Amino acid sequence: DVKVTQSSRYLVKRTGEKVFLECVQDMDHENMFWYRQDPGLGLRLIYFSYDVKMKEKGDIPEGYSVSREKKERFSLILESASTNQTSMYLCASSLTSGANTGELFFGEGSRLTVL
Amino acid sequence: GESVGLHLPTLSVQEGDNSIINCAYSNSASDYFIWYKQESGKGPQFIIDIRSNMDKRQGQRVTVLLNKTVKHLSLQIAATQPGDSAVYFCAENYSGAGSYQLTFGKGTKLSVIP
């Protein structure tokens, strides 16, 4: 089974702190994604990457950056955390080709609270 | 812009009854659709998918129906069980654009009454 692992399930940070959210997948997927999930707003795409060292902005990239130095790892960075970044962050991965192209495999989520 | 939406935000069903969760999509070029289930405190999990060259696909206790004419997608759960209580999301993708992104609906919360 595909496993997408997010390093932290719960984090509490202070305004202005730098935050790293780490995600690792073990199925050699080309594509990796970061979403945030908020009540009433559903899942919104922050950034995605379709290859090592490649990144593309999603729908809400402001205040975030990402890093993909290795195929299996995709990091989300909040340079200076703000209270409006309190949210559930979900990492996902997918294949580029094959019968299940497009199917996203999600991690368990990282719930970030910024005080 | 194009979006995926849901008709009902909440749905309560009696245990043992069938559940139907609906989804409307607006991008007529979308050719791949997925239903996800998200239990409280967990990430979304794949339930079933369907491509636009099909109208119906069945899994274990679940059926997805696609009506391209009215751009409507539904998820049917047979003999709903308490473990089916969760939020269900539909998602769409247009693979022809080379995009690997899924566009998600807002979700429907399914509550099963014992």
Image: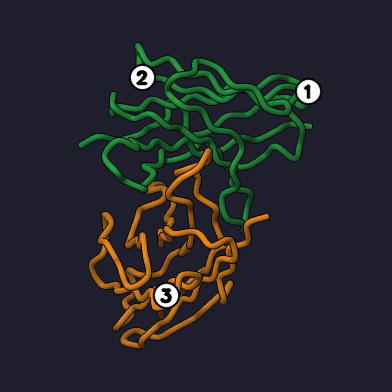
Chain colours: A orange, B green
- Above or below, B24 against A69 in this view is above
Q: How many marks?
A: 3
How far across and down, in percent of the image, does residue A77 sit? Answer: 36, 78
The residue most toward the top is B69
How far across and down, in percent of the image, does residue B72 sit? Answer: 41, 20
How far apart are labels 3 and 1 at the CA level? 43 Å
Instruction: Judge by depth and name the residue closer to the eye, A66 or A71.
Output: A71
Q: Is mark 2 on a helix, strand or loop?
A: loop
Q: Which residue is drawn at 31% across and 77% down?
A: A82
Residue topped by disc 3:
A75
The residue most toward the front is A98
Residue topped by disc 2:
B71
The residue most toward the left is B1
Looking at numbered disc 2 in the image, what kind of residue is underneath it? Lys
Q: Is mark 3 on a helix, strand or loop?
A: strand
Q: Which of marks 3 and 1 is in front?
A: 3
Q: Residues within 10 Å of mark 3 (few under 14, many from 20)?
A: some
Numbered label attached to residue B16: 1
- Above or below, A115 against A39 in this view is below
Q: Residue at x 30, y 82 (%)?
A: A79
Q: Nearer the viewer, mark 2 or mark 1?
A: 2
The C terminus of chain B, quarter of image: top right
Q: Which residue is drawn at 54% across and 63% down?
A: A109
Looking at numbered disc 3 in the image, what kind of residue is underneath it? Ser
Q: Which residue is drawn at 68% across and 27% down?
A: B59
Chain ID, mark 3 = A
Pointer 2 or 1: first along the chain:
1
Q: Residues within 10 Å of mark 1 (few under 14, many from 20)?
A: some
Looking at numbered disc 1 in the image, what kind of residue is underneath it? Gly
How far across and down, in percent of the image, does residue B48 sit? Answer: 59, 33
Chain ID, mark 2 = B
Left-right relation of A68 to B15: left
